[in-house]
Image (cartoon, helix red, strand yellow):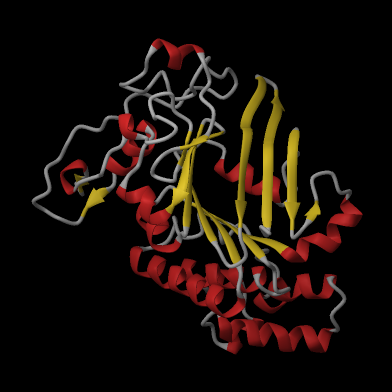
Amino acid sequence: MSLLSITDLTVHLPTGAGIVHAVNGVSFAIAEGETVGLIGESGCGKSTLGRALLRLSPVTRGGIELDGQDITHLNQRDLTTVRPKIQMIFQDNAGALNPRHSVGKSIGQPLRLAGWSAKDAKRRVHDLLVQVGLPETAYDRYPNEFSGGQRQRIGIARAIALNPKLIVCDEPVSALDPSVRAQIINLLNDLQARLGISYLFISHDLAVVEHIADRVVVMYLGQIMEQGARDTFWKQPLHPYTRALLAAVPSADPDAVRVKSVLQGELPSNLNLPAGCPFQARCPMATQQCREETPALRRAGSGNDVACHLVAPDTGATASHTVKETDRCPAP
């Protein structure tokens, strides 16, 4: 049984300009101890989806099942019994911490809300600080006294305080220096190995996702374009959007041939979704069918699930493509 299962999840947000179609009929699952990477351009609905899983954004339609329990429509009182199972690590580690609260108070607050005594909570916080690689002396200090990487460690300590089963990681390393980024990724991997935590890892950094994820889900304009196992995903991406994303990843090889990106134009407005395939306006392979009919997400021969009319459901041969080093753009 899956730890998390979402079915036809839809999030529409009313604004003064109209209805924002942030998430549109998304379905996938996360197993215990698994990391699912969620990728896509900014504005594709990744963070809104993550917030909806924690019920921080309203669900318009669909279902969220966590550890065998339907949490889609739980009231705030009932959610208090569920939230220890699912936590979040935020991208903005400075904004996620109250500058007037000490580190000990910030990490210990979930414990006190869960009914822990002050003595037990303090002992637990000291243990958490050690687990995330911070000195116990950090307990009485304040967020502004720490670097960005250290503040993210504080956020991770708070996220694992109540032994959650699932953590939504919303761009947790995007604002960090590369060396610090690697340290945080290694910390997340170590915690997963020791604690058995599952991750939904939201990121636009494909190199990081390739390193940490077991499976990958690609979103575009609030919908899933492709999903599959990490190895298959990188070796044989099928959807034109997936291939464009991978072709844009910088290469460490200075002799790699720079090719023109196949991804042109801007992400359409999610206030007025295009007809047919969401990607058709930017796809160099789009046909009339793509402009008129929305493709269903279906299994292709590679094992990936793909929403594309150009991919045969049995073999995937018409749009199969192995990303070679010459397809990748070298770093500028």
Relative vertical location of residue 113 with respect to residue 205 in this rendering, above or below: below
Rendered-image quadrant of the N terminus: bottom right
> In the figure, is residue 220 to the left or right of 126?
left
Does residue 147 show up? no
Residue located at (61% from left, 32% from top): 22
User: What x and y, as percent, mark residue 9?
Assistant: 68, 38
Furthest residue toward right? 77
User: What x and y, as percent, mark residue 272?
Assistant: 58, 17
Figure quadrant of residue 91: bottom right
Furthest residue toward front? 314
In-front residue for pair 330/155: 330
In this figure, what is the number of numbered marks?
0
Relative vertical location of residue 285 with respect to residue 108 in this rendering, above or below: above
User: What x and y, as percent, mark residue 23?
Assistant: 62, 34
> In the figure, is residue 299 to the left or right of 47?
left
User: What x and y, as percent, mark residue 228?
Assistant: 46, 48
Residue located at (53% from left, 67% from top): 152
> In the figure, is residue 119 to the left or right of 107?
right
Residue located at (51% from left, 24% from top): 295
Does residue 195 show up? yes
Residue located at (74% from left, 76% from top): 108
In-front residue for pair 149/101: 149
